Image (spheres, rainbow, N blue to C red):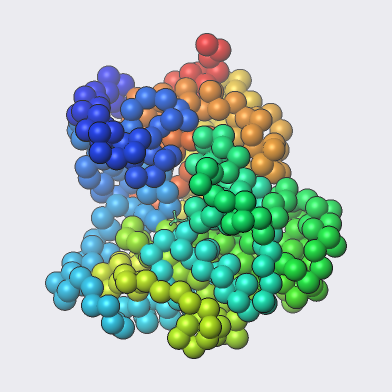
Amino acid sequence: MNIHRDDEISRTWFARAQEVIPGGVNSPVRAFHAVGGTPLFFVSGRGAEVVDADGNSYVDLVCSWGPMILGHSHPEVREAVEAAVARGFSFGAPSMAEVLLAEEICARVEPVESVRLVSSGTEATMSAIRVARGFTGRNKIVKFAGCYHGHSDALLAEAGSGIATFALPGSAGVTAGAAGDTIVLPYNDPDALRAAFAAHPGEIAAVITEAVPANMGVVPPAAGFDTLISATAHADGALVISDEVMTGFRVSRSGWYGIAGPEGQDTADLFTFGKVIGGGLPVAAFGGRAEVMAVLAPAGPVYQAGTLSGNPVASACGLATLQNCTEAVYTDLNHVSRAIGDLATEALSAAGVPHRLQRAGNLFSIFFVDSDVRDYDQARTQDTAAYARFFHAMLDHGVSLPPSAYEAWFVSAAHDEDSLERIAAALPAAAEAAARVD
Ligand SMILES: Cc1ncc(COP(=O)(O)O)c(C=O)c1O
């Protein structure tokens, strides 16, 4: 337990960072703006633990925002990466690791017959949209408020994640032209979906949805909503893109698809992946029906490319991670995630803090609200100041949570009984802090 945590070295480095990096960070949510204070600089991670520059150690419930599903510096993954590094870093030519990774993805998610590797989730969703537009010859896309699909222009409208954290409606720098073909609908709202297709028949290229929204906190699809998306889109000739960047290979060996299944005859046409498939190195992917993916260059007219796409070191890291994600790992993840969620709920209830824990498999988040959350408008009613107090008290007691009330908590297969004990010990004081009215 840190309690008297010293963060002088992190502060010094953050001051240096602010001189040369906008806001001192290379991705906004890291800046702690939503919770206040100075972000920590982490210098190492082993298993479920990360250590900051001042030598404080924390149980890590961020896990690099998802990728570290096996815990930090997993020995077999490290070995695979070291072996790949020894062979060379990048060739700009086909390499075997990328084929093996693509085969592993296709084997795990049945509707994915063909898959292209890229370097970030943003690239994956942006490219999937382009494929959908190229395949259908249509321009418009439908997305849901509170779903985050990366930071490409067309997808930033009413996105969750950092956009929610900073209470931005979208982003400066996105032209009306770039966002003009994006129709934003409330999540879990069947009437709004039907109305959008009725208003734009034959114009919508695709509906993109997070398999389970987890960037406004975790908001599972209401019963039948995914089926309705597929049925409505397919009846109009539009495609469905299931964004599994967050859920893919995290909530089951086949991601959310492995839990929800194809929901009858209808399923997504394209899937996007990221995070876990890189195991901590930059790998993401988009894939789907071979007929749809065939529009991509060099086979077809839709251009998409990347100097480091399918990089052999990153692919080796992703492949070793997936190969180690056995059924036993998912059983452990489910157990640990449930245990942590239960502990947090007990502590918050004991302190009288209104909250809702919502989960999708082992992915969960806690909303500081007093009713269930079905969409972005409801998510935004939560008490973010209470979360900020909770977050800092957890940090002071050696537990690192996501620095925003809108993010999911991530567990790894390395979280064990010791991690649970440390979390249990931290929670009462954090719940008391959340309950305190300033
Ligand atoms: C569902 C979803 N899609 C896309 C992205 C973008 O991925 P990246 O940050 O790798 O660009 C994210 C990132 O959090 C995500 O959660």
**Vertical relation: 410 (above or below) 17:** below
Tell me if residue 93 can be seen. Answer: yes
Q: Position of residue 178 (x, y in %)?
A: 59, 57
Q: Quadrant of residue 263?
A: bottom right
Dividing the picture into quadrants, the one containing residue 278 is: bottom left
Q: Is residue 146 above or below residue 293?
A: above
Q: Residue at x 29, y 52 (%)?
A: 72
Relative side of 246 to 185, left or right: left
Q: Nearer the viewer, residue 18 or 176?
A: 176
Residue found at the far bottom of this picture: 299
Name the foreground residue: 70 vs 317.
317
Q: 101 above or below 378?
A: below
246 shown above or below 83: above
Number of marks in the rendered image: 0
Please name whichever residue, 9 or 397, is drawn nearer the observer in this view of the structure: 9
Q: Residue at x 60, y 76 (%)?
A: 134
At x 62%, y 73%, the residue is 132
Which quadrant of the structure image shows residue 133? Answer: bottom right
For this view, does 339 lie left or right of residue 269? left
Horizontal and vertical percent position of residue 107? 49, 79
State the image coordinates of residue 19 (x, y, percent, origin top left): 25, 33
Residue appearing at x 27%, y 64% in the figure: 77
Q: Is residue 362 in sight in this rendering?
A: no
169 left or right of 101 in image: right
Image x and y of residue 179, in percent:
62, 54
